[in-house]
């Protein structure tokens, strides 16, 4: 049982093991427990732990007895004191099978990790609950970020919860529901006539002018630690046996990088062996910088011009952690794949109609990519695949329905038979 009020994960002090931070590109060391954005090389900082210490302290059995939320992995998380935890009930998300679709495709076991169950309806909650908890620990008074919608909503919710001010910038065509939820949850949101990286520039410029702290994807070290819990959960849910392949809808790539980090840490503490899933970075054909770089064998991914896709969460023309995404995909033996908006829409309709599972467009992109990869042989018919549905489908515009019934007219019962 895990009711937030009685959640032992939220009120039991546990040993923490952060030793330092490290530049993801150069390996340069940075001190823990002080405020950081990017490294001196302008690259993401990764949090490092005393994993031998974790290994000696944490057992699978102790973990199994804890309440089912993200904070169960405290020893592998950066927050030192429970007083700084800013929780809205970050439940472990279920792995939902899609048996009908996989049977029809002749594929192996197909599981969806349904991240739409998290607070604010998306997996951005994982990253922002960690970043805002750390901001609280550091006493940061004002946070700012660019967003395609879901990250801004999660920031707004957790910042309000923590009593911290939040300012958010989003592209002008961000889904209406996202803009509204950000404002409703206590942040100030501004529509900008540009894309997410244009919004990011404004946040960067405002650092000196306003003094806010930049919580952009990978520009502070802790969102990745929150997103890492997807990998920890997945491993634990599957009995510490990772799937053959993971399809991840890739924008800034925090989740993909985070899961790859999680698997390395789990191996270092003796919870899993060397087996790894192939990591597949799924992008939209209208915005596929990682796919282009992966295909060209490059380490960095230049900006994708004129980015467009209905899957707004993965409309990210340029990512500061590009090399970390590409590295994880390559090390895992995976690949990067682009799917068209038509394929995304068809996949969304198919899963909703046939499995009763309303994916978000980004989640639908992973299903579309799975179908493509199964057809071209990049995924085997006996392989277990996990798709990430990163937000609830209810946050997105749904097709209008025109069927109506006039109760004052005779009812044509035959039409219901
Ligand atoms: C942010 C987001 C993504 C991309 O996640 P990253 O880890 O930043 O790559 C995918 N789908 C949805 C719905 C999102 O909100």
Image (cartoon, rainbow, N blue to C red):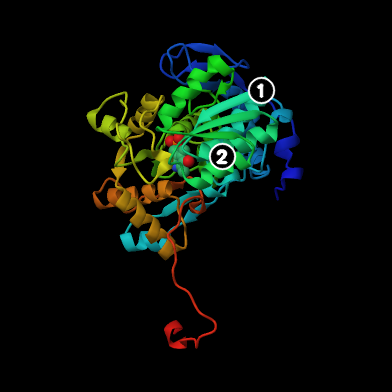
Dividing the picture into quarters, in which one does residue 335 lie? Answer: top left
Label ID, residue 153 = 2
Vertical position of residue 96 compared to residue 160: above or below: below
Q: Are marks 2 and 1 in contact (CB under 8 Å)?
A: no
Query: Left of 398 or right of it: where is 58?
Result: right
Whether residue 86 is visible to the viewer of this picture, yes or no, is no
The structure residue drawn at horizontal position 49% and vertical position 55%, both measured from the top left corner, is 96
Vertical position of residue 302 compared to residue 19: above or below: below
Q: Nearer the viewer, residue 305 or 27?
A: 305
**Circle 2 Cα neighbour tier, 10 Å, few/some/many (<14 / 14–19 / ≥20):** many
State the CA–CA distance, disc 2 to disc 1. Answer: 18 Å
Q: Earlier in the sequence, mark 2 or mark 1?
A: 1
Tag 2 secondary structure: helix
The percent position of residue 369, horizontal first and vertical second, equals 33, 47
Tag 1 secondary structure: loop
Query: Left of 148 or right of it: where is 5?
Result: right
Mark 2 Cβ and ligand 1 under 8 Å apart: no
Q: Which residue is mark 1?
A: 141
The structure residue drawn at horizontal position 62% and vertical position 15%, both measured from the top left corner, is 34
Q: Nearer the viewer, residue 320 or 82?
A: 320
The structure residue drawn at horizontal position 42% and vertical position 64%, both measured from the top left corner, is 353
Vertical position of residue 37 compared to residue 183: above or below: above
Dividing the picture into quarters, in which one does residue 127 lie? Answer: top right
Quadrant assignment for ligand 1:
top left
Label ID, residue 268 = none
The percent position of residue 162, horizontal first and vertical second, equals 69, 32
Query: Left of 2 or right of it: where is 384?
Result: left
């Amino acid at each position: 049982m895990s009711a937030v009020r009685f959640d032992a994960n939220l009120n039991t002090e546990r040993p923490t093991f952060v030793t330092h931070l490290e530049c993801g590109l150069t390996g340069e060391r940075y001190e823990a427990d002080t405020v950081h954005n990017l490294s001196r090389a302008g690259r993401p900082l990764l949090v490092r732990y005393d994993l031998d210490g974790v290994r000696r302290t944490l057992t699978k059995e102790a973990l199994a007895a804890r309440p089912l939320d993200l904070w169960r992995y405290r020893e592998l998380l950066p927050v030192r004191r429970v007083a700084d935890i800013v929780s809205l009930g970050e439940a472990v998300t279920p792995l939902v099978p899609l048996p009908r679709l996989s049977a029809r495709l002749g594929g192996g076991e197909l599981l969806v990790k349904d991240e739409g169950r998290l607070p604010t309806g998306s997996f951005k909650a994982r990253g922002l609950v960690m970043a805002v908890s750390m901001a609280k620990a550091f006493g940061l008074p004002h946070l700012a970020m660019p967003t395609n919608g879901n990250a801004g909503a999660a920031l707004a919710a957790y910042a309000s919860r923590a009593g911290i001010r939040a300012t958010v910038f989003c592209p002008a065509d961000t889904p209406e529901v996202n803009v509204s939820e950000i404002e409703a949850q206590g942040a100030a949101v501004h529509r900008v006539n540009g894309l997410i990286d244009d919004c990011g520039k404004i946040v960067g410029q405002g650092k000196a002018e306003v003094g806010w702290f930049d919580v952009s994807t990978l520009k502070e070290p802790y969102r990745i630690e929150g997103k890492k819990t997807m990998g920890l959960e997945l491993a634990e849910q599957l009995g510490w046996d990772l799937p053959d392949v993971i399809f991840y809808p890739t924008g800034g790539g925090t989740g993909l990088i985070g899961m790859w980090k999680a698997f390395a840490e789990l191996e270092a503490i003796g919870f899993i062996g060397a087996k790894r899933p192939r990591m597949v970075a799924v992008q939209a054909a209208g915005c596929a910088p990682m796919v282009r770089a992966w295909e060209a064998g490059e380490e960095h991914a230049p900006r994708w011009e004129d980015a467009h896709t209905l899957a707004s969460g993965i409309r990210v023309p340029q990512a500061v952690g590009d090399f970390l995404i590409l590295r994880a995909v390559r090390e895992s033996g995976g690949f990067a794949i682009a799917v068209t908006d038509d394929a995304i829409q068809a996949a969304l309709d198919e899963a909703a109609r046939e499995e009763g599972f309303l994916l978000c467009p980004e989640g639908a992109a992973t299903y579309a990519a799975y179908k493509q990869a199964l057809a071209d042989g990049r995924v085997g018919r006996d392989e277990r695949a996990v798709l990430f549905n990163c937000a609830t489908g209810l946050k997105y515009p749904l097709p209008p329905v025109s069927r109506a019934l006039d109760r004052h007219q005779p009812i044509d019962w035959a039409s219901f038979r």
